[in-house]
Image (cartoon, rainbow, N blue to C red):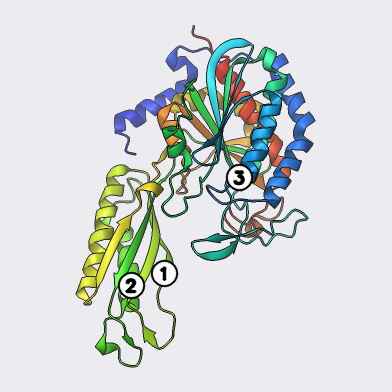
Amino acid sequence: MSLSCKAVRAGILLFALGPFALGLATPARAAPLHDALDREAKAIESWMIAWRRDIHQNPELGNREVRTAALVAAHLRKLGYDVREKVATTGIVATLKGAKPGPVIALRADMDALPVTEEVDLPFASKIKAMWRGRETGVMHACGHDTHVAILMAAAEVFTKLKGELPGTVKLIFQPAEEGLPPGEPGGAKQMLKEGAFDNPRPDAVLGLHASSALPAGKIGYRSGPRNAGADVFRITVKGRQTHGASPWRGVDPIVLASQVVLGLQTIVSRQVDVTTSPAVLTIGIFNGGNRSNIIPDKVDLEGTLRTQDMEMRNFIVKRVNETAEGIAKGGGGEAVVEWSDGDHVIPLVNNPSLTARLLPSLQRVAGKDNVSEVPRGMAYDDFSFFSKEVPGFYFNVGIAPNVPRAQVAPNHSPRFMVDEAGLIFGLRAIMHATVDRMMEVKK
C-alpha cells in the first residue's frame, strides 16, 4: 500500500497535533467510568485467564474453530448481545448498544491456532492433533490468539455491566482463519466483510490488539501509519523428467532446477529492488520432491511468502518471481509454473494516524507513559488490515513475554511460545479504555 510523500507528511502532522488537528476535544478523564472499567477488569481477570487456558488446551485451525466459536457465542448470548454466528464459516459478530448515544466501535479478536506441536510444559498444554495439508500435525495457540479471544470475552462482560454508562455501541468481531486458509477455502477478515460483518450498524472505528513476545508483560507497543506488511502466498511447480538416480543424463532433474530457482529468487530482493525505500522479504518455506534416494522425480513443489509494504514494489517482485523461476527452469530443460493465491493475499496494515494520536493517551493511562513505546514496522502480516481499510483502524501490541533473559524468549509461532498471563489485564484495560475514549469524543 503506497503512500505519497504528501500523505506521509500529513499523517505525521496529524499524529503530532493529535485530536486538535481534526477539531476534536481530547477525551475527558471521566474518572468514574475509567475507574469502573479498571475495577471490573480486575474482578474478571481470573475468569479471563481461565478462558484463555481452556481455549489454549483446545486449539482449532483456521475455518475449524467450531468449539471456540460455540464457547464465545454462548457467553455473548448470556450477556444479552445480539449475536450472529457462522460468518465466514465460524466467525461471530455481536452487538451491544449502550444506554447513551454515541459512535459504533468494532473490536476484533482472531480465534485460530497454528499447525504447531506444543513443546511447553504446562498443565493446560495442547495435546490436540489435526490434519493439515494431508499430514497429521499438532495444533497450538503459538501466536496468542487464545489471549485475544479471552480478552474480548472479558471486555464483553465488562461492557454489559457498564451498559448504563456506555456512550455508544460496541460491535465485537471474533474472526476465523487469520493465520491462513485451508487450500481452496475462502475465509478470514476479507470474507467476514463480504458477509456483512460491518453492516447494521457500520462501525465508526475498529480496534484490535495482538500479543507480542517482543514486549514483556505490562508494556504496550504502537505505531502510527504503516504498521504490518502485506503478504502473498505463491506456489511453484518445477517440472522435469523422471529417470533413475544412476543415470541423470536420461532425464531432467527438477530437484537441481528447483534448488537453482530458490537461489535465484534470493537475488530479487537483495539485488533488484531498492529496500531503502520500503522493506521486502521473499521466503521459500516448503520444498517437496521425490520419495526415494535413487529416483529422480518428475516434479518438485515449492511454496513461499512475499512480504511488502508498498504495492508498486509488490507488483514488481511478483513479476520478477515469475520471470526468474520460468527462466531458470527453461534454461535447464524443464518448466516452472508459478501460481499466486488470490485468497491468501493480504494488504498492508496501516493505522489511521489521527485515531492513533487520539488513543495514545488511553494506552498511556493504562500502562503508564514510560511503558508505552513506538515499535518499528513489522514484516509479519495481519488481515485486520482489511477491517482498517474500511473504517479508521488502530492496532497495537500487548506484551506477554515471560520474565526471563531475552535470548530465552521464544517468538510468536514457535512451539516453545509462552504467555506471561500478567500481561492480559493490560490488554483488557487498554482495549476498553480506547473504546470508551473514542466513544466520548465530542466536536468542539
Residue shown at 59% from the left, 54% from the top? 411
SS at badge 2:
helix
The label number, if any, that marks residue 258 in the structure image: 2
Percent across and percent down for residue 284 are: 40, 63
Is residue 275 rendered to the left or right of residue 211? left
For the residues labelled 2 and 1, say whether their Cβ atoms are less than 8 Å apart: yes
Instruction: Tell me: residue 299, above or below residue 23.
Output: below
Crowdedness of circle 1 by 10 Å Cα count: few (<14), some, many (20+)? some
The label number, if any, that marks residue 66 in the structure image: 3
Q: Nearer the viewer, residue 4 or 117?
A: 117
Q: Nearer the viewer, residue 190 or 282?
A: 190
Query: Between disc 2 and disc 3, whose residue precedes?
Result: 3
Q: Nearer the viewer, residue 266 or 248?
A: 248
SS at badge 3:
helix
Question: What residue is disc 1 on?
Answer: 287
Residue located farthest toward the top when viewing the structure as drawn: 444
Percent across and percent down for residue 434 are: 59, 25
Crowdedness of circle 2 by 10 Å Cα count: few (<14), some, many (20+)? many
Q: Amino acid at mark 3?
A: Val
Q: Amino acid at mark 2?
A: Ala
